[in-house]
Amino acid sequence: MKMIRNVVSALALTLLLPLGLTAGVGIITIEASKYGVLPGRTHDSGPRLTALLREARALSEQGDSLVIHFAPGEYAVHEKSLPRKTIFISNHDHHEERAVALLLRQLRHTRIEAEGVTLLAHGRLLPVVVSDCSDLTISGLTIDYPEPTLSQLEILSIDGDEVVARLPRESRFRIDEGRRVVLLGEGQETAVGSTLPFSSDGHMKPGRADVPFDPLSISRLDDHRLRIKGWAESPHLSVGDRYALRSWARPTPGITITDSERISLLGVTIHFADGMGLVAQDTKDITLDHFAVRRREGSERYFTTQADATHFSNCRGEIRSQYGLYEGMADDAINVHGVYLRIDSLLSPTRVLATFAHPQALGLTWGAEGDSVRLIDRETLLPLMTTTISRITTTDPEHKVIELADPIPENASAEMAVENYSAMPSVLFAHNTVRDNRARGALFSTHRRVVCRDNLFDHTHGSAILLCGDANGWYESGPCEEVWITGNHFVNALTARYQFTEGVISIFPVLRRVVEGQYYHGRVVVEGNTFDISPSPLLYALSVRELIWRDNQVRPTGDHTPLFDDPASRLINVGRTSFAP
């Protein structure tokens, strides 16, 4: 009888639904095509996407579970036709308003089915924003930009300090003052100042990190070829090299997830983003399965995103990232961290004025009443006290007033920061491939359990794995209490030097003063890994309570010139150690 009632209810609901909606047992399916959201490079889907999602939000508020289905194909969206929102995005440049294509807001129990769908983003827009959602899944979606704000030079010939190079056909540009390249896009311009150096085989060039693009003169030979004179990089060039042209701006990630819970991305791919591929902040429980930031098949591009592939700031619960592919990024494959707020004023023994000290961290929710927090000494990063939040208020996007359950010790340091110990997730990073990217592979800064296993780190230009912590620069918090690095394969990692890259595995909190016998990080186990590398430090460890190294295999390759005068591993203020072959 119950099944019959459900069928009858579903039938009655179907008769009452607007065009484009169908009902199953307890689930409403929205067909995007019925709203005029249709594939086609010349058809701007932006306005109709906005109308569809407005309807979806209304249905979700009524308690309905939803499936939003898109037919396969390429969907164009243009910045000028989209709604604009004020969104604070961690580790990105702040803009008063940004255009949003897929604004998934206040959706519950919703699945976005987008197998075979490519969203083509025109202009400086946010392709996907997930805000205040729960139990939401996006499957199959691909994101790309037809006119990315990065381009690249293919080196065609070299004659002393004179170089002939070609830009891809997709790139529009002009030359300013006879020596500067400005990339042009829909409603935007990007002045090039730096490069990502790739060899013709797609790997980043050994020993060449953050190469400036500073020629004495540039002249145009035709629509896509340039003659470049007086570039300091000329002695290091080879015919066939690709130098990705970039700025240091980070305006728009591909996917932004904020203030949500239980979010899953399945088989989602990003070919380019003018920032990070994915940013998740103030969100609990995130699953990435077969998520990819990768080069598009058939594309000339050697690059993908302007910064990290995935980035998790001030999140909770569990982050699971499995079977992913991350390549060609201008930064790390994954970075998981909390946020230190700098304490600028003691308003009373229990009240502090705390500041988002880094300009790319402001505006986050950060904390709530009842959260566990730690006050730390910014010089040593060591804890001064642990307590809970009694009350927290936002005075403006840069500041929080925090009422603590306990008074601050009278002898506390003059330079303090506070971290939210509740807003740190456990992490599983497994069966992923990280390759041909700048800077570092995987960064973890969280006191909950981290498992990094069975991954391939192939030609990460800097360190493959970094455990950090910093209350003076980036203000990314999170002493690691338990980290397992097991079963990974490292191939020719650390072929260039970047910040914090002192070993293939680098444990490097930013300490202004080391206190012997007191440690920032807890227990780190490096077990059962294979290292195929040229002579480089396998391990750099600073301020670790316990370090275990066992059953690892090291196979010298001799593929690259050593970067370090002394390739031996270094341990600084490390407590208990256990090293076995």
Image (cartoon, rainbow, N blue to C red):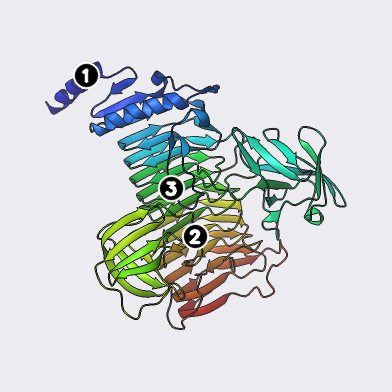
Quadrant housing residue 423 = bottom left
* Marker disc for residue 88: 3
Read off the residue under disc 1.
11
| Alpha-carbon span between mark 2 and mark 1 | 51 Å
Percent across and percent down for residue 562 are 70, 67
Q: Distance between the residues labelled 3 and 2?
A: 22 Å
Disc 2 target residue: 443
| Residue 339 x, y percent position in the rendering | 42, 60
* Quadrant, the C terminus: bottom right
Q: Classify residue 493 as left or right of residue 252.
A: right
Q: What residue type is labelled 2?
A: Leu
Say whether residue 375 is left or right of residue 533: left
Occupied quadrant, residue 386: bottom left
- Classify mark 3: residues with Cα within 10 Å, few (<14), some (14-19) or many (20+): many
Q: Nearer the viewer, residue 576 or 397?
A: 397
Taking the spot 29% from the left edge, 27% from the top edge, the residue there is: 28
Element at label 2:
strand
Q: Return the disc, 2 or 1, that comes first in the chain's sequence.
A: 1
